[in-house]
Image (cartoon, grey):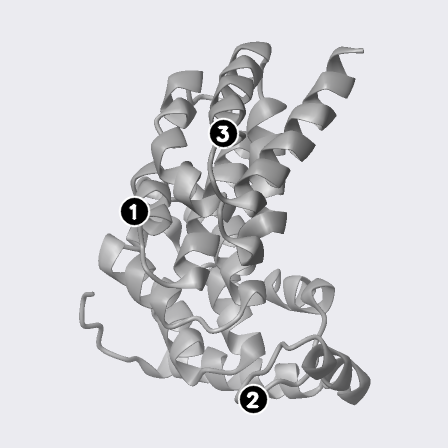
Amino acid sequence: MDILIDDPATEKLFREILVKIRLLKNGDTVAQMKKMGLNYKINWGASIIHLRELAKNYEKNHLLALKLWNKGWRETMIMATLLEVPEEMGEEQMDYWTKSTETAEIIEQLVANLFVHSKYAFVKAMEYCCGKKFLVHYAGLHLIGRLAMVDKKAIDEMFETFFPVLSPLAKDPQLGQVFYRTMTLMANRSAELRKSCIDFLEEVKLMEEEQARNMASLLLADFAEWED
């Protein structure tokens, strides 16, 4: 990543945002998130809706986003995904932010707010699906789904290239929900891609792992209902 020189104006904005985040504190939300297994070093319990509203008061700013991410609060990391400039975010930064993330919530914000708008999106989706860590796999799957939903210019063949790396992920019960959602979004993109998804799932249905077979059967049954 590039080394950027700090400046007083950006530091002022950074400090201002920290104060405003503290004002959004919600202890009940923090307690509920802990029960759900969402643990952060610092979590003020601010809602995503309130953070989005806060972000609207600021222009996108690469340096500011880096400062917010490095602060390490749940809220500052989410704000970083909202205020980063996609065109100024390189592959190294995408990798660092992905691999330093410890919750699915932040991964989802990274993908939806930022990664899906990157010129490296398809490359990184493939790369992350081939990664080693659960959350890296989660990022890859989620990014494929978001691309299927929002990238109207991409041709179906670009999504078909993901099938070989999706097969191993179908075995992981932890990825079941995001795998299901991603396959559904891909199948909903076009009739042609849906057929390709069905052919892929027929192969997954023959795998040894019960998780993969059950997931394929569920998706195939759902897709069959679409045809009725």
Q: Where is residue 165 in the image (x, y as percent from the top left)?
A: 36, 38
**Mark 2, residue position:** 42
Q: Where is residue 20 in the image (x, y as percent from the top left)?
A: 64, 82
Of 18 and 199, nearer the camera is 199
Crowding at mark 1 (Cα within 10 Å: few <14, some 14-19, many 20+): some
Please tell me whether residue 100 is drawn above or below residue 95 in the rendered image.
below
Relative horizontal placement of residue 4, taking residue 113 as reference (left or right): left
The mark nearer the N terminus, 1 or 3, is 1
Relative horizontal placement of residue 225, taking residue 39 as reference (left or right): right
Element assignment for label 3? loop
Of 65 and 41, nearer the camera is 41
Q: Which amino acid does label 1 sit on?
A: Glu
Q: What residue type is labelled 3?
A: Leu
**Mark 3, residue position:** 206
Relative horizontal placement of residue 102, taking residue 121 as reference (left or right): right
**Mark 1, residue position:** 127
Q: Do the residues labelled 1 and 2 touch (CB within 8 Å)?
A: no
Crowding at mark 2 (Cα within 10 Å: few <14, some 14-19, many 20+): few
Q: Which amino acid does label 2 sit on?
A: Ile
Looking at the image, which residue is at 41% across and 68% down?
65
